[in-house]
Image: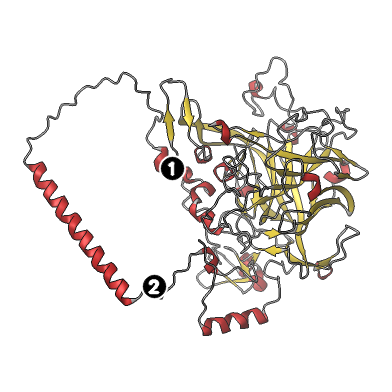
Amino acid sequence: MRFRSLKIPTATAATLLFILSVTPCDAGWVDPDTPEESLTTESHFPQDNRQYELVFSDEFEQDGRTFEDGADPRWTAIDKNDYTNEALHYYRPENVKTTNGVLNITTILKSNTYKAFDEKKLKFFADAKHIQSGMLQGWNKFCMIGGIIEFSAKLPGDPKTGGLWPALWMLGNLARGTYVGSSNYIWPYSYDKCDEKNRHSQKISACSKVGHYGLDPGVGRGSPEIDILEAMMGSDEKLPSTNITRPYFSTSLQIAPGVEKNRPNLGKLPKKGYWYTGLEYGNNTQLNPFFYGVTLIHEPKQFTYQSDAISANTRVTKDFFEKHHKYRVEWEPPNDDGTDGYLKWYLDGEFLYGIRGENLKISGTIIPREPMYLLMNTAVASSWGFPKPCPEGCDCKCFKCGDPDCTCGLPDGFCENIPASFEIDYVRAYQAVNESKHFLGCSTEQMPTGRFIAGHKNDYMDAVNGQKEPLLPIQNGGSYCDTSADCGLSSKGDCSSSKRCVCHDGYTGPRCLSPSGFDDNPPPESMEHIEVDMIVMSPVFLALAAFAAFAFVLFVSFAALRKRRQVENYDQLPTEKPTHIYRDAAPSAIDGNGSYQQSGGFNLITSNDPKTVTYCMIDGRLLDEH
């Protein structure tokens, strides 16, 4: 049982009331460089007459900002391999920085070696990728439930050359992007019904009678995905089942569980009655026939599940690669019973695509109501804009510019198209004033995530490569400096006599270049802990507990001493190692120095067939330790 009552001493309560009375509402995440005219906005949806106020912004005006772990309160530029979607890139923080008043995510040709895992041999090996790029994510920093999100961005590279995959998107906080251990059985669930078919594959199921990690019993949870932009470049020849040609970008809702029977084939339109109906399309937008979702295969079979991508494509021109354009999604969460709610996408103020809660009846899913965070990245993957099928005479087993044996599978002109920069001018998020369905925070009272993440923290970090915590504390100053110009000048920080940056109020980071960020009204800490009634912990009870503990320790010590004396009476065992023959024993499932049980709690069940290894409820952490 979960208890959320909060006991606050009188003095503490008075202090909190004072702080709340002087703190501007919902201003903790607002960048002070945001223009005054952008502090409010109106919905582009004619039927929405609510007033919207800015709750989050990053204008990226300050040049020289970096985003390595611990450097920025809003974002983390990850430093790891990406093994999703047939990725060919390695993410590095140095590929993400602010220059000339914009955020630059730059993709370059550079080799990175990393520890990979052979799923057949069950052992790690050294591998390499030859493309380096960047991903910025706000996981477990800034999250929101409902509202308006707008990016101003310029797409990277040549619009007629395929291979780059720039994206602006949102993900539920229960999963961390590219950390597959955190997303297994979580992504992209948006489902709050109890049924036997899905209870095994949905990690946090509505069938649960008891709430663990602060989660409510009987409430289905997950990590749905909202894609605001995924750009596809390439030649503009006619494509099957659509009038949209490249370059285009996709806007999508990805959810689970998905439609299982009579699924549409890629490149073809769905059969009537077997896909989502009633979807709304703008004048320049059509259904995306090239991505309907994925089947996530696990063993045993009942843990396999289907996800759906409800997606639309919009044609863009060369201008989108030369100038910044505004990409917006308006997100209204569902009612408490899961009904209604909607998503509407816009480009430069023009309607593109809309999904309403009633459109999701075929799968029983709901419009997202999870705390969701923002992501920006440029990926390179053989599954996106690369030649399919593999060109004749090419095995497509390697992809490396400059190596004649590894360039045949690359898109035409790809190597000449790099380096390429994805520019974001600003990110702004708004919520409706006094709207009871809109919330801020990555772990809200209605949708907590904090204790679950803490209880599964290995899933949210790269422990194999030395990461000890999912996120480092934000460094407040301390970077070496020669003058105050190195610390944001006098407005943000100063260079001390010891040649270290000292930040002013409202700014943080090693060089004081980042505006501070925090939730103005965070949920009380007690919601992340089980409250213990102190009346039960009376002095008599504590004395009895202490006596019982002392007696137990005394008993164990006596037993251990007795056992030791018995062992000393035996003759010494022979030192020569005896030989044993095991007729039916399977070969060891683990080669090398480590145990998966030590590194991630991974359990294996071996069979008598040396070629077969059955994974018991795969949690994905094994894959995350590349």
| Residue 150 visible here | no
Q: Residue at x 57, y 36 (%)?
A: 303
Pinpoint residue 588: horizontal percent, then vertical percent.
37, 27
Dot 1 and dot 2 residues touching (CB under 8 Å): no
The numbered mark at residue 601 is: 1
The numbered mark at residue 536 is: 2
Direction from residue 252 to residue 42 in the image, left or right: right
Q: Which quadrant would residue 587 be assigned to in this image?
A: top left
Task: Name the element at disc 1.
Answer: loop
Comparing labels 1 and 2, the label whose residue is closer to the camera: 2
Task: Examine the rendered structure and indicate whether residue 441 appears above or below residue 418.
Answer: below
Q: Which quadrant would residue 317 be assigned to in this image?
A: top right
Pinpoint residue 338: horizontal percent, then vertical percent.
72, 54
Task: Name the element at disc 2.
Answer: loop
The amino acid at mark 2 is: Val
The total of numbered circles placed on residues is 2
Pinpoint residue 40: horizontal percent, then vertical percent.
82, 68
Task: Examine the rendered structure and indicate whether residue 138 appears above or below residue 113.
Answer: below
| Residue 128 visible here | yes
Q: Which quadrant would residue 416 be assigned to in this image?
A: top right
Most extreme residue toward the right is 283
Bin the neighbour count of mark 2 within 10 Å (Cα to Cα): few under 14, some 14-19, many 20 and up.
few
Task: Examine the rendered structure and indicate whether residue 51 appears above or below residue 120.
Answer: below
Alpha carbon distance from label 1 to label 2: 35 Å
Q: Residue at x 89, y 50 (%)?
A: 351
The amino acid at mark 1 is: Gly
Bin the neighbour count of mark 1 within 10 Å (Cα to Cα): few under 14, some 14-19, many 20 and up.
few
Q: Nearer the viewer, residue 58 or 443?
A: 443
